[in-house]
Structures are given as structure tokens and as C-alpha cells.
Image (tube, rainbow, N blue to C red):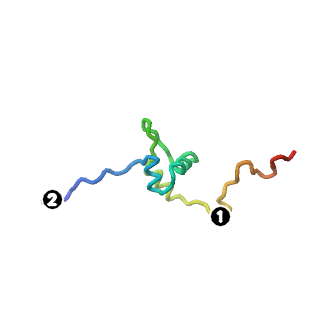
């Protein structure tokens, strides 16, 4: 007779950068950019950089602005400034 309470797989709490990149089908560089701009939280555990599952879930739930109002201005494109003008 088989027991009804079979051991379950341990719950995933954190992802490594390469693992999350594969899961989301993006490059590890994209994950790095998301960590640098604060969209994903990173934690260091020894030499490992990990991203908490809760941070990934929050990122995926977050609404992202689209269209012109959601675009950030390009660097150096502040109004009234032009390169080469004196």
C-alpha cells in the first residue's frame, strides 16, 4: 500500500540569474539590468547572487506603462540642451 503523504519537492525560494533568465526566456544581461534598475531585488548568499521568488512574482504582477507616457527620456536629451551649441 502506498502512503497518501508522499514527500513533495521543496518550494523554490530564490532563483539564480541564469536560472531565472531561462525561465523568463530572456538573457542573463536583461536580468542584470532589471536588478540594477531596481525592478528585481537581489540578495547575496556567499558568492552567489540570487533573486527572491517574491521579487519575481511582484515584478510580473506590476503594471508597466506603455506608449509615450511610459517612455523615459534618453540620457542627455534634456529640453533646451543641444550638443555643440554655445
Residue beneath the point at 85% across and 47% down: 85
* Residue sitting at the far top: 46
Task: Say what secondary structure mark 1 lies in.
Answer: loop
Neighbor class of circle 1 (other Cα within 10 Å; few <14, some 14-19, many 20+) is few
From the viewer's perspective, tell me whether residue 10 is left or right of residue 31: left
| Quarter of the image where the N terminus is located | bottom left
As measured in the structure, the alpha-carbon distance from the residue carrying label 2 to the one carrying label 1 is: 56 Å
* Residue sitting at the far right: 86
Residue beneath the point at 48% across and 57% down: 25
As drawn, the label of residue 2 is 2
Q: Residue 48: x percent and y percent?
A: 44, 39
Q: Nearer the viewer, residue 41 or 86?
A: 86
Q: Nearer the viewer, residue 58 or 22?
A: 22
| Quarter of the image where the C terminus is located | top right
Residue beneath the point at 50% across and 49% down: 28
Q: Residue 16: x percent and y percent?
A: 43, 46
Which residue does the numbered mark 1 point to in the structure image?
67
Task: Say what secondary structure mark 2 lies in.
Answer: loop
Q: Residue 41: x percent and y percent?
A: 50, 46
From the viewer's perspective, tell me whether residue 25 is left or right of residue 86: left
Amino acid at each position: 500500500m502506498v502512503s497518501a503523504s508522499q514527500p513533495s519537492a521543496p518550494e523554490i525560494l530564490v532563483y539564480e540569474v541564469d536560472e531565472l533568465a531561462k525561465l523568463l526566456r530572456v538573457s542573463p544581461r536583461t536580468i542584470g539590468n532589471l536588478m540594477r534598475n531596481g525592478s528585481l531585488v537581489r540578495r547575496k548568499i556567499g558568492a552567489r547572487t540570487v533573486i527572491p521568488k517574491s521579487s519575481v512574482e511582484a515584478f510580473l504582477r506590476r503594471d508597466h506603462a506603455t506608449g509615450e507616457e511610459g517612455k523615459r527620456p534618453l540620457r542627455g536629451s534634456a529640453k533646451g540642451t543641444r550638443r555643440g551649441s554655445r
